[in-house]
Image (cartoon, grey):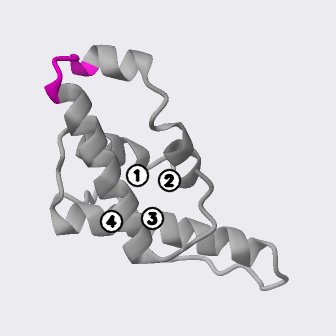
Amino acid sequence: MKMKSTDKKYLQAKIFSLMDEVERILESGTSVDDFIDETNIFDDWEHMIPEREYPIFVMAVLNNIRKESIIETILFSILNDTNKKNMQKTSYPKKSNLISHFGELPFN
């Protein structure tokens, strides 16, 4: 899956579609451990989602968690990461963030 689009609705639909697909596979009797060992379904997403949010994404997909705050966090991380990559290609100076979010989780 090539993600050139940064459309939030499109990404959300792709995530929900992935959740539906994983749910069908797991309902067929495949264990989560076997599924994770044998699948490459997350490979494309691993390259799009920042490392910090990737485990949250995998857990949300495996457990079919569609809570708005979690989905918004995942979408924000994808879109924000894409914007950072685009800005790094330009000659804009780097801005440093002084606000620390250490210890915060999207589940709060």
Going by the numbered disc 4, the residue's amino acid type is: Thr
- Residue 29 drawn in magenta: yes
Marks 4 and 3: CB-CB under 8 Å? yes
Going by the numbered disc 1, the residue's amino acid type is: Glu
Quarter-of-image position of residue 59: top left
Q: Earlier in the sequence, mark 4 or mark 2?
A: 2
Please identify the dominant SS of the magenta region: loop
Going by the numbered disc 3, the residue's amino acid type is: Ser
Q: Position of residue 6 (x, y in %)?
A: 54, 74
Q: Mark 4 Cα within 10 Å, few/some/many (few <14, many 20+)?
A: some
Marks 4 and 1: CB-CB under 8 Å? yes
Marks 3 and 1: CB-CB under 8 Å? yes
CA distance for labels 4 and 1: 8 Å
Q: Is residue 86 above or below residue 20?
A: below
Query: In screen coordinates, is 7 left or right of 71?
Result: right
CA distance for labels 2 and 3: 7 Å
CA distance for labels 4 and 3: 6 Å
- Of the numbered discs in the image, which one, if any, rests on residue 73? 4
Q: Mark 1 Cα within 10 Å, few/some/many (few <14, many 20+)?
A: some
CA distance for labels 2 and 1: 7 Å
| Residue 101 appearing in the image | no
Quarter of the C terminus within the rendering: bottom left
Q: Position of residue 22 (x, y in %)?
A: 28, 37
Quarter-of-image position of residue 61: top left
CA distance for labels 3 and 1: 7 Å
- Of the numbered discs in the image, which one, if any, rests on residue 77? 3
Question: Mark 2 sits on what residue?
Answer: 49
Secondary structure beneath dot 2 equals: loop
Marks 2 and 1: CB-CB under 8 Å? yes
Question: Mark 1 sits on what residue?
Answer: 53
